[in-house]
Image: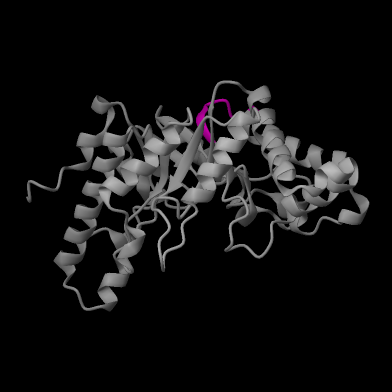
Amino acid sequence: MNQDLVPLTLFSNPIGVDISILAFEYVDNFKYLPLFDGVYISNFGWSVREPEQQGQFKGLGFLNDILSRSYGKKIFGGHVIYAGGYPNWVKKLDRTKLTYEDVEQIIKQRIEFCVGRYPQVKIWTVLNEFKAPWFDQDPLYDIFKEKFIQRFGSLGAQEEEIETAYFALIFNTAKEINPNPVLVYSDATNQFKSKPGRHSRYERNLELMNRMLNRGVKIDAIGIHAHLNSVPNNWIPQPNEFEEIVRSFRSLGIDVHVNELDVSVADLSRYGIPYQERYLFQAKTYHEFIGAAIRAGVNYINFWGGYKTEIPG
């Protein structure tokens, strides 16, 4: 074995970093669970109010099955509020019949369903990918914004005030319901800095976290979605670049989590790169990135995958 490729197990508890593996839909990942400190459940089902609300993924029975199979491992939960995870009844809300208080109650009930109902979860991604450009719309935030303006008038016309009120409602409600879990805001394309030809949400995230913390929003950590697509390579940050990003977030007084880490080698196969070279590239990238994360003080890493197409053999 190449001595430069440090085995994954070296990055476990002895150095104080929690490492988990994704459970959602990838049930085969449970055979790898003994190697990890915990299991990450990425999308808890919405509470049942209509037949179509039987959870966001395979019903609440699937969720309970995952919880029961965690074998005493730490459980990390995610995507409490997420534009890409709403059930149809949220997407079809009739805003003409809703007040600001109605929308506020919908959000509070959702948080209660997750943070209040599952105290065994130690870390929650409470809000995920806020106002991400890859979503055409965010119906819950859009309705909140409309009703906030109607309720508070000219104050509500300021976008920063609306964003702050939305974050405060979500995070402060979660902290009131259960003060124990670590509450995370998570986002994507924030593992690198912006440069020509490469747009990053890092700079936006840094400003957003600084503003929210200064306004009393109870955010404990920022989550980084490190989907390190191998082609183009500019999605893979240089180690010193990623260390700077982590330290800049930590300087705000919050923890930093890497909660969606994967290195896709699928693109490399299309370019005729030999099989063994693809997986060496993947291993080298994991090694460099995780090493940078540890040096910079990342508190938690979750592997987003274990996909059959990404595992050699």
Q: In the picture, residue 131 is in which quadrant?
A: bottom right
Q: In the picture, residue 135 is in which quadrant?
A: bottom right
| Left or right: 115, with 109 as reference point | left
> In the displayed structure, would residue 36 be above or below residue 135?
above
Is-magenta flag for residue 9?
no
**Residue at 58 percent of width and 52 percent of height:** 57
| Left or right: 278, with 98 as reference point | left
- The colour scheme applied to this rendered structure is one colour
Is-magenta flag for residue 119?
yes
> In the displayed structure, would residue 94 be above or below residue 128?
below
**Residue at 61 percent of width and 28 percent of height:** 218
Residue 230 visible in the picture: no
The one of 167 and 155 positioned closer to us in this rendering = 155
The image position of residue 30, as x and y in percent, is 36, 43
**Residue at 28 percent of width and 52 percent of height:** 238
| Left or right: 225, with 34 as reference point | right
Q: In the picture, residue 291 is in which quadrant?
A: top left
The image position of residue 61, as x and y in percent, is 59, 43
The one of 181 and 151 positioned closer to us in this rendering = 151
Residue 106 visible in the picture: yes
Please report the bounds of the magenta region as a residue range. Answer: 116-124
Quadrant including the C terminus: bottom left
The image position of residue 208, as x and y in percent, is 58, 42
**Residue at 69 percent of width and 39 percent of height:** 164
The one of 223 and 200 positioned closer to us in this rendering = 200
